[in-house]
Amino acid sequence: MEVSIHEKTAVVKDVFGRRKCYTYFMNTPDHTLTTHQPDSCTTHPMLQALRLLGDMWTLMIVYNLLSGSKRFGELLDAMDKVSPKTVSQRLKMLEESGFVQRQAFAEIPPRVEYTLTEKGLALADIMEAIRQFAERHLSNNEPVSSSTPPPYH
């Protein structure tokens, strides 16, 4: 197994030649805290997908938008116990990465709606697979909340 350390990030090649990236989060006198990763680790498509899909609030936004356009307040209400700042940051990230479209209407009071783009709608099958997994393996036979959007195929 080959290991190289660059900017406090280890890039490990296992016996199959696959690259694995590990970030050291040490804060010692001679090492400062860093989250930097080499470009080869941050641009790998699988890592990018896991970063997107690994964030529960991002997935909840996508899940709620699968049923159609929503205003910020509607998303906030649908996502119990999350701060407006978190929802705002995730919406901005989803918009910048092309998964969500923000549409502002020139009305008084101002109105903004968020809609999934074609790229965002491509997550529907993944969301359905997660929903099915949750119902089969995590549900404890409790009924699904009526505020939960219906399954999408």
Image: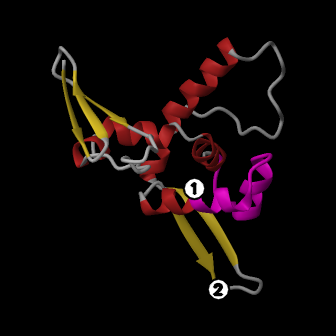
- Using a 10 Å C-alpha cutoff, classify the residue at mark 1 as few (fewer than 14 neighbours), some (14 to 19) or many (20 or more): some
* Observer able to see residue 44: yes
Residue 5 image offset from top left, x and y in percent:
23, 37
* Observer able to see residue 122: no
The kind of secondary structure element at disc 1 is helix
Query: Is residue 35 or residue 49 the one in the foreground?
Result: 35
Residue 55 image offset from top left, x and y in percent:
56, 41
Quadrant into which the N terminus falls: top left
Query: Is residue 106 or residue 25 the one in the foreground?
Result: 25
Query: Is residue 9 or residue 56 the one in the foreground?
Result: 9
**Which residue is depicted at the point 64% across and 85% down?**
106
**Which residue is depicted at the point 44% across and 40% down?**
26
In the image, taking residue 123 as reference, residue 15 lies left or right, namely left
Q: Which residues are magenta?
A: 67-89
| Quadrant in the picture for residue 3 | top left
Query: Is residue 55 or residue 107 the one in the foreground?
Result: 55
**Which residue is depicted at the point 42% across and 47% down?**
29
**Magenta stretch holds residue 73:** yes
**Which residue is depicted at the point 57% across and 29% down?**
128
Q: Which mark is residue 90?
A: 1
